[in-house]
Image: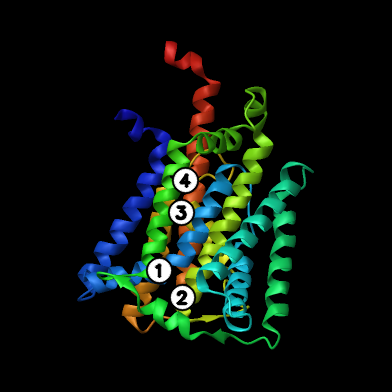
Amino acid sequence: MMRFFSRKHIPLWATGGVFLLLYLGAAFRYEGFLGMAVFVNLLRDNAFLGLAAIGMSFVILSGGIDLSVGAMVGFTSICLARLMGDLGSPPVLASLIMLLLGTSLGAGLGCLVSVFRLPPFLVTLAGMFLARGLAFVVSLENQSIHQPLYDRLGDFSYQAFPVEILIFVGGLLMALYLAHCTRFGRNVYAVGGNEESATLMGLPVTRTKILTYALSGFCSSLAGIVYSIYTLSGNPTAGTMLELDAIAAVVIGGTLLTGGVGYVFGTFIGVLILGVIQTIITFEGTLSSWWTKIAVGGLVLGFILLQRFIQSQTSGALARPWRSQE
């Protein structure tokens, strides 16, 4: 029990505290904020961001970065509409094709990073331009495409929860299982903590990195499918700058950018914090939407400083073990 209250969990507790303060503060200020409809809309509006952030969590935990997630959302969105429209592909088959393409692209980026030792920032930046360019090529006329099928999928819900939320929650539960209950998850933490030590321990570092980027590609494609259902259309510009929001959610969720420390559940709370800020601005009615970016920027900076402080304290304690013997 005490391990859960250790120093490395401070960012996670801070994330939860910020979310509660924002949510409860808004509940006192705005009538109806605690209603079920507001919470459902909060989850639905941020489902595609949450899925992309889940994939980003694994990449950052492994010590990397993935700038292609937003472009993959747009590529998946427009290709899915084309497959179901022009080619008449069944929705399930079209979705499986896009998930396979996203996973393959992610695995390819992972190979370049792990096998050829190329910088993740530059590799995934190239992947971002590739995916976004292909999205515009597929769109032909640079226009969004509406599919009647999206209307039926958008209307589908289980009890009060739309299909977007069901997919998001299902993806979150699977991610929690992968991160904390499988060998792959343990390998991701080990590689992100110290790649050289993981190699000396005989862990499959190269394979773990490739699988991590493949998982990010899968999550991005799934986010693109959810985005299409949410907006009832396919759009080549979908997911523009989404990668920055995903990174922000991961950092606010308490994951170290250096890798090895963090929690997928913290990323989920980070996504909810971004959503609550947007909802508060909507309820206020008089504030510009740009205040969302200002608030998120302040939170990201604050959590980076908190992480830096914790790292410096931990390093200092390790460098002065003689103090504990006095």
Residue that extends furthest to the top in the rendered view of this protein: 325
Determine the residue positioned at 45% across, 74% down: 291
* Mark closest to the chain's N terminus, 1 or 3: 1
Q: Distance between the residues labelled 1 and 2?
A: 7 Å
Name the one closer to the observer, 280 or 272.
272
Under circle 1, the secondary element is helix
Q: Where 202 falls versus 118 (above or below)? A: above
Q: Circle 2 sits on which residue?
A: 229
Foreground disc of the pair 4, 2? 2
Cβ atoms at labels 1 and 2 below 8 Å apart = yes
Q: Which structural element holds mark 4?
A: helix
In the picture, measured across the screen, residue 113 lies left or right of residue 317, that is right
Comparing labels 4 and 1, the label whose residue is closer to the camera: 1
Q: How far apart are marks 4 and 2 (CA)?
A: 37 Å
Mark 2, secondary structure of its residue: helix
Residue occupied by mark 4: 306
| Residue toward you, 149 or 314 | 149
Whole-Å distance between the Cαs marked 4 and 1?
33 Å
The residue indicated by pointer 3 is 252
- Foreground disc of the pair 2, 3: 2
Residue 164's tag is: 1
| Residue in the picture at 55% in, 54% down | 56
The number of callouts visible is 4
Query: Which circle's residue, 1 or 2, is located before the other in the chain?
Result: 1
Q: Which of marks 2 and 3 is nearer the N terminus?
A: 2
How far across and how far down the image is residue 314, in percent?
Answer: 49, 30
